[in-house]
């Protein structure tokens, strides 16, 4: 019987075994500039959206989940100030500012952690979906559950 060959898989030869990375990075900016807000989204590829361009290329049914993100990005751009660093959000927002629940909270939370997000904003009505997540997903996250857009604004722009 032939003895098995030992192969060390290290960063330098990883591509030889698994191929080139499908995604180059999860974040477009190290420091978020005015007008850019990280929105939480989930698809079969498990991605996180880092830049909102009015739903261009959005996955089906992703549009409403970007409501808080779009409003926040527009306010950031209009004021010329960036949002709090390390923040991401999801939530549909009504014309009167009510933040409505969305789906895929587990997947969006995992995507946020993967991207190094420290603070996430979720709709108040999604608290029931979040509280049942295992601690290895939620540990280290500052989570805010919001019912009105004003709460999102106060978290995203802590200096007013």
Image (cartoon, grey):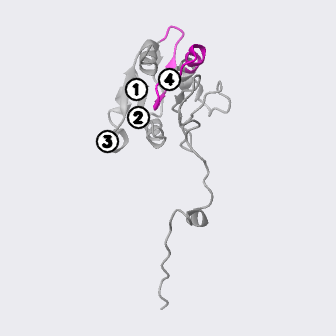
N-terminal of the pair, mark 1 or mark 2, is 2
Query: Gap in Å between the C-alphas at discs 1 and 4?
Result: 23 Å
Mark with earlier residue (3, 4): 4
Residue hosting label 4: 83
Q: Viewer-proximal residue, 119 or 130? A: 119
Q: State the image quarter where residue 147 is shown.
A: top left
Mark drawn on residue 126:
1
Using the numbered discs, state the Cα–Cα distance from disc 1 to disc 2 in whole angstroms.
18 Å
> Does residue 7 appear in the picture of this structure?
yes
Q: Indicate whether 124 appears above or below 117.
A: above
Residue at 42% from the left image edge and 26% from the top image edge = 122
**Mark 1, other Cα within 10 Å: few <14 / some 14–19 / many ≥20:** some
State the separation of the CA atoms marked 4 and 2: 13 Å
Nearest to N terminus: mark 4 or mark 2: 4
Q: Are marks 4 and 2 in contact (CB under 8 Å)?
A: no
Task: Residue 89: say if magenta.
Answer: yes
Kindly identify the residue that appears in the image at 53 percent across and 29 percent down.
39
């Amino acid at each position: 019987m032939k003895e098995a060959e030992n192969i060390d898989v290290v960063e330098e030869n990883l591509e030889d075994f698994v191929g080139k990375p499908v995604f180059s990075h999860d974040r477009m900016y190290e420091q978020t500039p005015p007008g850019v807000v990280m929105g939480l989204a989930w698809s079969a590829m498990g991605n996180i959206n880092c830049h909102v361009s009015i739903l261009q290329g959005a996955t089906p049914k992703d549009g409403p989940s970007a409501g808080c993100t779009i409003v926040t990005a527009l306010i950031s751009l209009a004021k010329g100030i960036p949002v709090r660093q390390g923040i991401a959000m999801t939530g549909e927002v009504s014309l009167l500012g009510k933040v409505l629940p969305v789906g895929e909270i587990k997947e969006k939370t995992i995507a946020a952690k993967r991207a190094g997000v420290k603070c996430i904003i979720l709709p108040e009505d999604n608290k029931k979906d979040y509280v049942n997540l295992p601690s290895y997903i939620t540990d280290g996250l500052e989570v805010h559950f919001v019912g009105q857009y004003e709460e999102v604004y106060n978290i995203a722009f802590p200096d007013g």
